[in-house]
Amino acid sequence: MSKVIVKNGNVDGAIRTMKQKSARDGLLKKARERQDGYKKPGVRRREKKDAGIKNTRRRERNNY
């Protein structure tokens, strides 16, 4: 669990920092993945492959 210190009563900034830290940790993403329950190894492998293709296409599109 991440900790954030509130400085000068700036709660909004602390909330923003907390959201960024939790996104980097991937805690919410893991919880969403577990919500679906067990997936067969082949299904996990297929999803990982599709995500890799999608990310590669996005990177290529942004580089041009």
Image (cartoon, grey):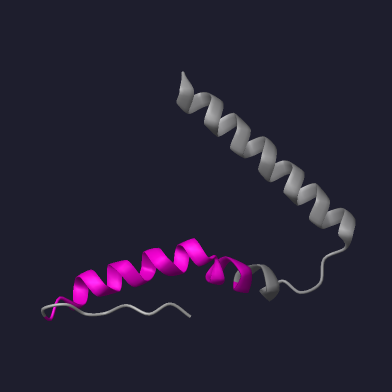
Where is residue 47 drawn, in percent x and y?
75, 50
| Residue at image location 21% in from the left, 80% down from the top | 6
**Left or right of residue 26, residue 16 in this image:** left
Within the image, what quadrant is residue 55 found in? Answer: top right
| Residue at image location 32% in from the left, 77% down from the top | 4
Rendered position, 1 above or below 51: below
> Magenta stretch: dominant SS?
helix
Where is residue 33 drawn, in percent x and y?
67, 67
Q: Please give the range of residues in magenta.
A: 9-31
Foreground: 12 or 5?
Answer: 5
Check residue 15 for magenta coloring: yes
Rendered position, 20 above or below 56: below
Within the image, what quadrant is residue 58 found in? Answer: top right
Check residue 7 for magenta coloring: no
Q: Residue furthest top?
A: 64
**Left or right of residue 55, residue 20 in this image:** left
Where is residue 35 drawn, in percent x and y?
67, 75
Rendered position, 10 above or below 53: below
| Residue at image location 48% in from the left, 80% down from the top | 1
Within the image, what quadrant is residue 14 found in? Answer: bottom left
The tally of labels here is: 0
**Left or right of residue 44, residue 30 in this image:** left
Where is residue 32 drawn, in percent x and y?
61, 70
